[in-house]
Image (cartoon, helix red, strand yellow):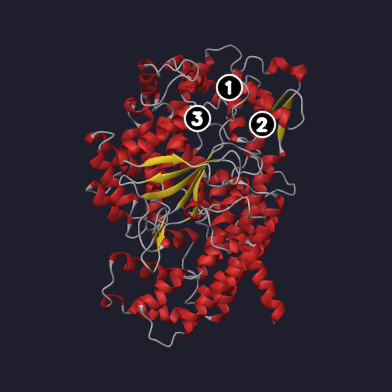
Amino acid sequence: MALTILTAATAQETNPLLQDFDTPHGTPPFDRIKLEHYKPAFEEGIRQARLEVEAIVANPDAPTFENTIAALERSGALLEKVSGIFYPLTSSETSPEMEELSSELQPMLTEYSNDVSLNPALFERIKRVYDERDNLALDTEQAKLLENTYKGFTRNGAGLDEADKERYRAITTELGSLTLKFGQNVLAATNAYTLNIPPADAHRVEYMPQFARDAMAEEARSRGQEGWTVTLHAPSYIPFLTYSKERDLKEQLWMKYNAKCYEGDELDNTQVVKRITELRLELARLLGFETYADYILDNRMAGSRATVDNFLNELLVNTRQWAFDDLDDIQRYADGMPDSPERIMPWDLHYYDELYTTSKYDLNSEIVKPYLRLENVEKGVLMLAEKLYGITFRENPDIEVYHPDVKVYEVYDNDGSFLSVLYMDYFPRQSKRGGAWMTTFRDMYTTEEGTEVRPLVTLNFNFTKPTADTPSLLTFNEFVTVLHEFGHGLHGMFAKGTYASLTGTSVYRDFVELPSQLLENWATEKEFLDMFAVHYQTGEPIPAEIVEKIIASKNHMSAYSNVRQLSFGITDMAWHSIGRPVDGDVAAFEKQAMCETQVLPYVEGSCFSTSFSHIFAGGYAAGYYGYKWAEVLEADAFSLFKQNGIFDRETAESFRRNILEKGGTEHPMTLYVRFRGHEPQTAALIEKIGEGR
């Protein structure tokens, strides 16, 4: 016994994850946290959480909201703390060792989660409180937590008999491992491929923009190669498709990107996809739902599969022809050029679209990028938040970061009180997954003593790194991405409430994109651009005529982009509306699902489902439609800003008070109507897409 006590005490003293963080605002001490600290910290977190749950069950007093529902919400604090650090880092600063540890931890965490969800004595206490809910005089937040807790337990198998509970355990354990494997395969496949153009083929890159050549040369140098290297990471992949004339190389690159994890090798995800969807169907049936989509949508703003299918179909029917018109415009332009393809293929679109935009609007990425230096964009976005909400940002070098590229700010409210820590991680690396996302190292909550614990928010991007000669210059779309993720960031930073599971971005999936997509609207507002967009070499402000061209072109290809997004949402719904397991080819299933959304020619051998991380590894299963759903909300919401002024503090304060601060404390439609005064209409988005046609 003495040895055990000594070992535990030693672990407590040497493992920073098991100690209180003596850091600014309780931020993670990344330089002290080592890989070997995580597993024992997870094990201790699970041990403590189990004891806390056992104490709730063993309480001799009659179950109440406080001794059962609130106590359960506050249980597992150490486990939440460790998970909140480890899992964000598996996306932004991973390693083979961390991925191996993730695989090892997954069954442990699933087992613990199932032991809680399937505990009959615990569920009995929860049910007794729930059955008395009308007599408890709960406030709105307490009532929502009680509803979520009860519903969460029933959705996680608490009402099943013992045999079905065991099957539920087996399904969720296997699903946890499979979704983890899916994401790891996608990252590995993305990192595995490079296209190198040797010095002898310099003519194949010499006409490309300097920034693209510099980035490709830097990529080659970093890999010990000569010449110019392209990868499947977006800051490398997209510029090559946009500026290169080498159709053979672009086709090769496009095929590699669009057949990730569909090549029959050790990273192939075809069987993983089929097994995930099979298990999800079985899980749904076990819980009394016809399909997995029905199960998911029972807990979403949309409410039902029929609502989502009708929503997606309405958008498709009303915009599909416009999408073909968009592509026809590009095709006609290409037809007038020498050596143009008879029919534009997917690997041609970026190139001809860039030329077309330059021709029609006298605008292209190279005209705009000098005015979108990353540092200036960051300054502009922070200024926008200050102007709308009165908050301020102070960079603090004393707060530790997990990678040298990361910048960190303290955020203060308009009354000077501390609001949040904000980490900004801009550049790609092999240890970081692709895309852009927001997450937290710690969510906001209020302690039992009434102390607010403020959030630690992180925004992640994959922009081209500066070179020795050129700073990081963003494309207009990348600038929009900064606004998008910053909108999520505001949702996290402004969080208010008592319970972490209800604050910040802890909302329905089809509501979470409203703050992010709303903020994108400022990208084409001249008043905003004039605040920060200056030429990185001359310091001259962005000319009015360029801003006017950006505004004139903002609806360019909007219908095509809309239908492309619909294709993802429709394919997602197809995978999760199956009534029996898919035993055929994954690509064939995908092709059939998205045939009505196919605008560009279909390419045999391509398959995006096998790398569709949003739905097979990222929590958006039967939920990808939410991006379009949120576009309807934001189109309607931004019209109020346009009506009252894009910097109107009263409108911004209403959005903050009714949407950003509220998190998931009330139903999202209730919150939206409180802000806007009416329910959103699909017509608002269709009208926006159809502007100028």
Residue farthest to the bottom? 60
Measured from the top left, where is residue 484 in percent x and y? 43, 39
Residue that badge 1 annotates? 470
Measuring from the top left, give residue 67's x and y in whole percent: 40, 78
Of tags 2 and 3, the one toward the viewer is 3
Q: Residues within 10 Å of mark 2 (few under 14, many from 20)?
A: many
User: What residue would you read off at disc 2?
Assistant: 253
Q: Is residue 252 left or right of residue 276?
A: right
Residue 526, located in which quarter of the rendered image? top left
Q: Nearer the viewer, mark 1 or mark 2?
A: 1
Q: Under tag 1, what secondary structure? A: loop
Question: Which residue is denoted by mark 3 in the rendering?
Answer: 374
Q: Position of residue 500 (x, y in %)?
A: 42, 61
Question: Three-letter amino acid code at disc 1?
Answer: Thr
- Cα distance between the residues tagged 3 and 1: 11 Å
> Where in the figure is residue 572, as x and y percent of width and height?
51, 50
Residue 26 located left or right of residue 249: left
444 is higher (above) or lower (below) than 282: above
Q: CA distance from mark 2 to mark 3?
A: 27 Å
Quadrant location, the C terminus: top left
Q: Are marks 1 and 2 in contact (CB under 8 Å)?
A: no
Q: Pick whichever, 78 or 238, lies toward us.
A: 78
* Residue 313 visible at all: no
Q: Viewer-proximal residue, 198 or 20?
A: 20
Q: Is residue 334 above or below residue 287?
A: above
Badge 1: how crowded within 10 Å, few (<14), some, or many (20+)? Answer: some
Q: Is residue 232 visible?
A: yes
Instruction: Inspect the image, locate mark 3, and give the three-letter code of the amino acid beneath it.
Output: Leu
Locate residue 281: give its quadrant.
bottom right
